[in-house]
Image (spheres, rainbow, N blue to C red):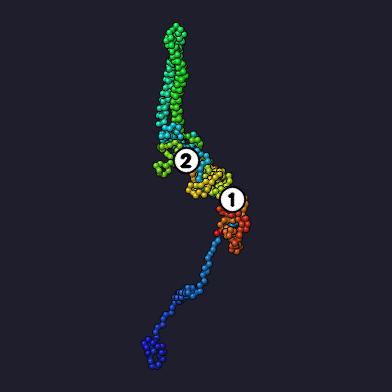
């Protein structure tokens, strides 16, 4: 037999006369607690094997969950607005420029020695700016001295002319006496020789000619003297006017405010650099923009609208105004000015035209200052009551409008509608929908 074979044991029969070997000791019985623990482990392993490998798994359903946003059809007042972008400005203001000098020498002596602060509020009559007038004062003193000299020249020349006039009158009287003497001598020519008579006749004619010449010189000399005095007077008056011009320039060097308002300094470019505000110490030239006084209680929005939309605007239309710098600030206003002609910008194509529009701002706010970017939603059309559908629910197909209306079972039904005016949020539904119906948004 093979050594690997384990033959079954053959029972040994007891024979008489033989001795029986001692029996093997029996194993002690296991405790009930150990048996229960082993059984529990076996059952847990079997349950895990069943859940993981044996139990059939249900087929997964790959169905996407779709959530449709919806809106309701409402009934109420409807407004159609057009947004106008622009900047704020003052309706009541005046520009302050460097004074236009009447004296031609004043233009080179305009140094700004005093200037109000930008953004400050001033009262009517308050000093805004002061220009240095020292050189002009010195020049005026020189002109006054020249005027005094001119007046002295007039007095001196008048005295000289009086002496000349007396001398001329004396010359005329002498000439008249010579004529009379020559006439009397000529009357005694009968007792004289022919030569003497001719000499007397010549003397008389010569004296008479001198007398007539002296008579002619009288009005001519009078005209000459009057012209000389007039020239001296004109020269004096010219110096007086020169002085008055500079005195007016000196008054203009002190700039006063003509109304109550806020100061907005102008921008200048120095040496080709970036623009900077006018400041104390600047050299000014006549007519240079200096500052602007604006009445912040009377503000407006300056904007432009495309010429295709200009026909929708009317004077008096209401507007809601917002400022980009202050998102929470909302102001009311109305249209008060619309341009008559469309104009084009220099950066735009020639065929693009805009119409200027001005919108007055109602109310006063301390944050409302000029040159702020702003927008105004102008109400160009309104209805007291209209059925409105959200604009996001409207679909277009072949120049027709339709919406998807929610049904009781949760599905949506396509329905054609007729629409009228629309704004940024809603469109007026003329037919096809009723108030309260729920529509799907795109």
Q: Measured along the vertical axis of the image, is residue 250 above or below residue 89?
A: above
Tell me which corner region of the image, top left, top right, bottom left or bottom right, holds residue 234: top left
- Which secondary structure lies at badge 1? strand
Q: How crowded is mark 2: few (under 14 residues within 10 Å), some or many (20 or more)?
A: many
**Rendered-image quadrant of the N terminus:** bottom left
Q: Which residue is drawn at 51% across and 41% down?
A: 90
Find residue 336 and report its image quarter: top right
Which label was assigned to residue 79?
Answer: 1
Residue plotted at (40% across, 27% down): 142
Q: Nearer the viewer, residue 298 or 155?
A: 155
Query: Where is residue 296 shown, x and y percent of the image?
Result: 51, 41
Indicate the secondary structure of the residue bearing disc 2.
Answer: strand
* Quarter occupied by residue 237: top left
Outermost residue on the left side: it is: 3
Name the residue located 60 percent from the left edge and 64 percent from the top edge. 409
x%, y% of residue 113?
41, 35
Sequence-first tag of 2 and 1: 1
> Please, which residue is most extreme toward the front here?
194
Q: Position of residue 302 (x, y in %)?
A: 52, 44
Tell me if residue 111 comes above or below residue 152 in the rendering: below
Q: Nearer the viewer, residue 309 or 336?
A: 309
Task: Say which quadrant the C terminus sits in.
Answer: bottom right
Residue 358 is tagged as none
Q: Distance between the residues labelled 2 and 1?
A: 38 Å
Q: Which of 227 and 281 is in front in this view?
A: 227
Q: Percent position (x, y) of residue 164?
A: 43, 17
- Tell me if I can see residue 261 in this picture: no
Residue 101 shows in the view? yes
Residue 301 drawn above or below residue 61: above
Residue at mark 2: 264
Q: How many labels does the image show?
A: 2
Label 1 neighbourhood size at 10 Å, few (<14), some (14-19), many (20+)? many
């Amino acid at each position: 037999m093979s050594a690997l074979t384990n033959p079954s044991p053959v029972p040994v029969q007891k024979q008489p006369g033989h001795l029986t070997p001692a029996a093997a000791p029996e194993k002690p019985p296991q405790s009930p607690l150990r048996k229960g623990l082993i059984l529990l482990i076996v059952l847990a392993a079997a349950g895990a094997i069943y859940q993981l490998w044996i139990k059939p798994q249900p087929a997964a359903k790959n169905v996407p969950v779709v959530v449709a946003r919806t809106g309701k059809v409402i009934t109420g007042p409807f407004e159609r607005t057009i947004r106008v972008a622009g900047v704020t400005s003052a309706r009541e203001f005046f520009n302050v420029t460097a004074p236009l000098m009447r004296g031609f020498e004043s233009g080179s002596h305009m140094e700004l020695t005093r200037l109000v602060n930008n953004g400050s509020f001033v009262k009517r009559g308050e000093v805004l700016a002061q220009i240095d007038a020292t050189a002009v004062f010195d020049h005026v003193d020189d002109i006054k001295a020249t005027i005094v000299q001119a007046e002295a020249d007039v007095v001196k020349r008048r005295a000289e002319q009086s002496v000349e006039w007396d001398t001329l009158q004396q010359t005329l009287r002498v000439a008249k006496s010579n004529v009379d003497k020559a006439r009397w001598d000529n009357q005694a020519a009968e007792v004289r020789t022919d030569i003497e008579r001719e000499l007397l006749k010549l003397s008389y004619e010569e004296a008479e000619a001198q007398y007539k010449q002296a008579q002619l010189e009288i009005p001519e000399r009078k005209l000459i003297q009057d012209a000389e005095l007039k020239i001296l007077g004109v020269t004096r008056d010219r110096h007086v006017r020169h002085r008055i011009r500079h005195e007016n320039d000196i008054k203009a060097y002190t700039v006063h405010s003509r109304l109550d308002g806020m100061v907005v300094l102008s921008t200048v470019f120095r040496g080709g650099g970036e623009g900077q505000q006018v400041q104390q110490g600047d050299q000014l030239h006549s007519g240079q923009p200096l500052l602007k006084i604006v009445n912040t209680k009377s503000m407006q929005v300056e904007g432009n609208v495309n010429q295709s939309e200009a026909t929708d605007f009317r004077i008096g239309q209401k507007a809601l105004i917002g400022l980009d710098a202050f998102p929470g600030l909302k102001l009311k206003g109305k249209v008060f000015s619309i341009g008559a002609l469309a104009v084009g910008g220099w950066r735009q194509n020639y065929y693009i035209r805009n119409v200027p529009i001005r919108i007055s701002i109602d109310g006063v706010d301390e944050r409302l200052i000029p040159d702020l970017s702003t927008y105004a939603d102008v109400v160009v059309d309104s209805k007291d009551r209209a059925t409105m559908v959200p604009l996001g629910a409207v679909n277009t197909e072949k120049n027709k409008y339709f919406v998807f209306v929610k049904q009781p079972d949760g599905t949506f039904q396509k329905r054609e509608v007729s629409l009228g005016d629309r704004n940024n949020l809603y469109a007026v539904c003329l037919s096809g929908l009723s108030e309260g119906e729920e529509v799907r948004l795109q």
